Image (spheres, helix red, strand yellow):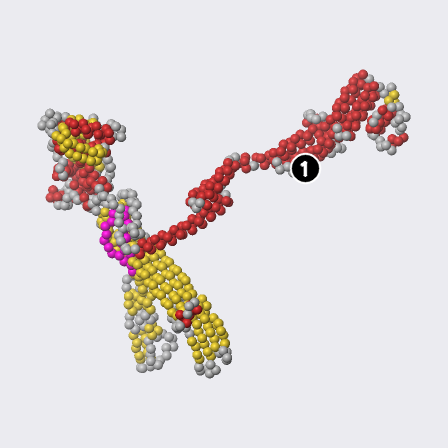
Amino acid sequence: MRLHAELFSPCAQGAVVCLATVFMAFSWGASAEEVEKAAEPAAPAETASVDAQSYETEFSVDEKAILGLLSEAGAFTENGEFEQALRKLSEAKARLDKFEAEKPGKTAEVLKEKYAVFAKDCHRSYAEAMLRQCRDEYVNVISDENLSAAAEKGTAMQKQILRAKFMYYLGTYGGEQQALNRAVAQDSRSDFAARADELNADFAKITNYTDVVKETSLNVIDPGYEDRQKEIQKLYHEGENLYRNRRFTQARDKMEQILILDPYNVQATQMLTRIYRKLYFVADMRAYNEMLQDQALVEWRWMENIPREQSILPDQNAREYTETNSPLYEKSKKLIIPSVEFIDRGVTDAIDYLREKSKEVDPERIGVQIMVTGQKGKNADKRLTFSLQNVPLYDAIRYLCLQADLRFRINEKSQIIVIGPEAEIAKGDTKDKIYIPIRRATVNRMVNYSARSEGGSESESSSSGEGFKLDEGLGGMKVEDTFSSGLAGTMSKRRSAPDYSEKLRKYFMELGFQFPDDTFYIAYDSRKNRIVVQHTPENLRKLELLIREIDIDTPLVLIESKIMEISMNDYEELGFDWTLTHENVNPNWSFSISSPMRPSMGTNNTLINNLNILPNFGSDNVWSLFLTVNAIDRTDRAEVLSSPKLMAKNGESATIRMVRQMYFPDSWSEPEISTSCGSSVSLKPSVPEFGDATDVGVVFTATPTVSPNNYTINLELAPSVVDLVGWSDYSYEIVFGYFTDIDNTSKITMKMPELSRREVQTKIKVYDGQTVMIGGMIVDRQTRQDDKWPVLGDVPLFGRLFSRDSTFIEKENLLVSVTSRLISGDGVPLRSNPATGLPDFRR
């Protein structure tokens, strides 16, 4: 079949010409290189000798179809439609394989090689296009601010580059990496692999960078950053609103919370600076107001501090325990009955009434069980009439028994209060044993016993003291009582142990406690420092309360004094001094008029000095007018606070010194002058005579005495403040007639110190924890000068230039206060510090 060239497109015509050339080369027996060279498409000028329209070749249908597909693939490749070109090549490959299977031979090989040339050109063009697309995309990726999108695009482009390499060398989109590496190694003339690897490395850098950025991003490193920033913004806005509303302390708390979340927050730090400046300003104003308040308080009529009203009850003493061992007793004391009204009421009805009332006032609605026994006697029909208000149940029962001639007993085991005749109650009395801690010194005073009398006679023992006194403190306690050593001392104590029991029994019997038989006893356990008592429960409670009242450890006294000196000086002055001078022709004469006003207080307050206002005026230019302006407004304030604090034992003096020892001359000797032969004079000047050193500073001496109630303190105080304020100069000169003193030794220097002493000696009584002003002094000096020129000073407005006004105010205040507190042996105050206010001086 004839195939004409005009049936194809221009590109196809070129392909046909190339194919014809290839066929001719093979038919002539040319080599493969010559065939490939001949198969290259020639330029139109070069192919001018070949007339495509006159050249005809015989082709089969399959050959024409294969050549047509290759021609179309070439056209698609030139147009950049590589997917269409690949499809055409795929169809051509299928027809070529079929043609080769049906008609093997030289024609099939030529077509196969030509297909390879077309496929290679298409694949490489497609790969180059893919690489160019990746390079263009690289420019977009590096300019993309979205790192996540850039990373995704970079990864996609890396895959695209790998597909381009497979397409360039293997003609596929993918495959085995080893096959690709072999193809790259075989094609050493092409630099496509190098260019693709370089671009792939660039994309890898972007991908790695984005991964690093993601891994090191703030959200990854600090997951709670955003939530913390939201909380910081919230706190900051709250703090700003509080600051605008002048709630500075709360605003400061908000800013400090921000600094806890973010220690380097600049906004919070700047806001804190503003807040602290406001707080400093407010604190400064408050300090100034407090100073004025203290000044007003001192200037007010001095009076002692009035402590708050409070009763000194026995239970305010220092005790080791605060409750008894009987729960029923404590409960009966705590249950308060509002009103008890008995008018001609029987005993049984009255007891029933108290029983019901105890249930009403009991928060648990249990009340107290009261049992009546032995009512068949003469007291069964006794009628009661009495009235009580807000009385404890225990006292109500006690008053009932007193009026009805009955007794009552608290049964601790059954938790019942038993009321009945004395005989019945005595039958049911049980004996209990308790152990009461007590100090050895207290027991020694009870029995008039000391370590020296353990081996002596009874008379020596009885003469060792005058008996027990509550206000003796630790005076009767000896070191030998507690720290006696050796077997002899132990045996002596064991032998004298019975004396403790007998003397303690005798001591408490004198106080009203009876011991009917040997089953009622009292003894002292010297090893554990406790008293062992066996008696009825009621007497045990009374005995325990009594021992607590007796065994009181006298505390130490902490004394703190504040000596405050405040001095204020205010000086104001404004004055004008005029001077008029005249110079005569004759130098022996001069004329001047100066201000008649007195000088100021000695302060250098000259603002304008000798200003020559009208120099050299007059007909002969010999007059001059000078002006001097003195102006000052000065305020001085000084505060000196001395706060000595010391701890003292009851009845003992204590002194604290904060002084410097300085030696001052007590006197000066008289000078001695002697002459020799009437021509020479010798002088022996005065010399200082020194005595003992003088303490300059603060000396505080106190002697406290604690009252038996352990609440009031008698203080004997002697605070003293000594300062060196200056020296008095008593220097003098000795004149030797007409003699001249060459060395100027005739001037004798003699000075004496000027000491300022502030002393207070007083005896006062204060309550524990109270502050008392023990001394005060106010010195107020005011000096005023009002000078002016006659006539000129009285002219309105203009006369102020011819006057001088000055005011000097000097105030000195001295305050001495003392605070005393009772301190236990372990350094803890016996009572909390009471909140007492200042005396009311604003009325």
Residue 201 place in picture, x, y as percent = 66, 35
Q: Is residue 772 magenta?
A: yes
Q: Which region shows up in magenta?
A: 757-776
Above or below 756: residue 129: above
Residue 53 place in picture, x, y as percent = 89, 26
Name which residue lies at 73% across and 26% down: 83
Name which residue lies at 82% across and 28% down: 11
Reading the image, the residue beneath label 1 is 139
Q: Looking at this view, is 724 or 837 the one in front?
A: 837
- Residue 290 is left or right of residue 240, and the answer is left
Q: Looking at this view, is 245 or 452 the one in front?
A: 245
| Image-quadrant location for residue 120 | top right
Name which residue lies at 37% across and 75% down: 744
Count of marks placed on residues: 1
Above or below 255: residue 811: below
Residue 554 visible in the snapshot = no
Q: Magenta span: helix, strand or loop, mainly?
A: strand
Please name the amino acid that badge 1 sits on: Val
